[in-house]
Amino acid sequence: MSKMKNISLVLLLIVGFACQENKNYQDVIIDGEYLIAAQLKLTDVIIHDIFSPPVASRIYAYPAIAAFEVAALADPSYTSLMGQLNGFEKVDFETEGEVYYPLAALAAYYKVGTAMIFSEDMVQGHREKAFKAIRSAGVPKKVFERSVAFGEQVADHVIAYSKKDNYHESRSFEKYTVSSEPHTWQPTPPAYMEGIEPHWNKIRPFLMESPDQFQSPPPTVFSTEPDSQFFKEAEEVFLTVNNLTPEQSDIAYFWDCNPYKVNVKGHVMFAEKKITPGGHWMGIAAIASKTAGQDWKGMAETLAYTSIALFDAFISCWDEKYRSVLIRPETYINKYIDEDWLPVLQTPPFPEHTSGHSVASNAAAEALTHLLGEPFHFVDSTEVAYGLPVREYNSFREAAAEATISRLYGGIHFMPAIEYGAEKGTKLGFYVNEKVNTRSDNLARAED
């Protein structure tokens, strides 16, 4: 065979393989694995940049909404969130030619996620690796470029929407001034950090009409008298921690979700950074979507829906925290019961009432139950990366109940904050389910 014939044969083989790859490129992204990977990287950056739980809920929400908007454009059985979320205006997106929507959704997620954080290079590097793998799998160059551009067009609209939620303005609001009143929150050891996000109730909710729409009952009337109800609540925390079972201790640590635990050894102080409560539930959302066998569109829906519930949950919770500015168990117990007592978990730097994990967990659980039903068995592996074993649950509500009571086991909340927080989160979850419709055929509105 001549050299020219050999070259021709090689070219024919290359063209043949290229055509085969181009023909089958629609199968490159079927499930939600790429979105899961993108969210995991965003979690890494949230931990690295040390974003607080309320801010983290914002960082998770907008990218997930952007990805879902692409899913809604790709499939008419899904309904856009534009016109449903407060201030999220409807617009038309234009493109000429074929768009590979799974790639567009991923591009939208990455662009919005990058706009939300400090360490942009970490997300951008992850994006480039993902895009290289997708392009190498045979997505035609023009389709690839057009799809990325389309996804970023959707992202630009979501980013513009995010800039009107008052977050950037709130960065210049004054700090919380610690009161000398005996019932009020005081910074706790070892870092004695200032109160985090005292103005979070100024952030625009996605669905609530106002931050106090689901206002909780006030905390128990403060008292230092041993026969008072408040003293008994503090004593309950004190005795529970002092008599923890191994299982209760495991539950406390599993649901700790403290993004910035300060450790002190001798004269050295160092931080241990971990996932936030919202991050834990966004991890559960991804696990649950994968367990349910959802495709990339279902994954986008589950992440967006859960993040919306979490976002409003933190606004509602923080509204109450800085209304009541109640003292934490650690401070009260050290002053009036045992000056050497320590909680199992490190007390986070914001007021007591209500419990953030209780509100967020129950809101997320109702959202996920609405989407995926009950019972729903899943293995929660979100904490494995932080040295903890998996835990298994038969429903999202079961997981939320455990997360809720973990705050007593950890010694960082009184029972009213836990119970009222769970009630607030559940009510908010129901409200999300009533207000948001992500399916044109109402498939996501099954009776709970």
Image: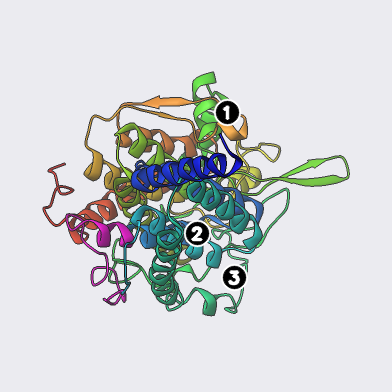
- Asked whether 335 or 195 is in front, the reply is 195
Q: Nearer the viewer, mark 3 or mark 1?
A: 1
Q: Residue 108 placed where, x, y %?
A: 43, 62
Q: Which image quadrant: the N terminus?
A: top right
Badge 1 element = loop
Can you see residue 197?
A: no
Q: Which mark is residue 388?
A: 1
Amino acid beneath label 1: Leu
Tell me the CA gap for discs 2 and 1. Answer: 29 Å
Give the labeled residue for mark 3. Answer: 176
Amino acid beneath label 2: Tyr
Q: Residue 58 placed where, x, y %?
A: 46, 62
- Asked whether 175 or 44 is in front, the reply is 44
Q: Which image quadrant: the C terminus?
A: top left
Report the residue that reaches farthest toward the top: 246
Residue 326 as seen in the image, left or right of residue 268:
left
User: Is most of the magenta stretch helix, strand or loop?
Assistant: loop
Badge 3 element = loop
Amino acid beneath label 3: Tyr
Does label 2 or label 1 sit earlier along the sequence? 2
Over which residues does the magenta segment extend?
69-93
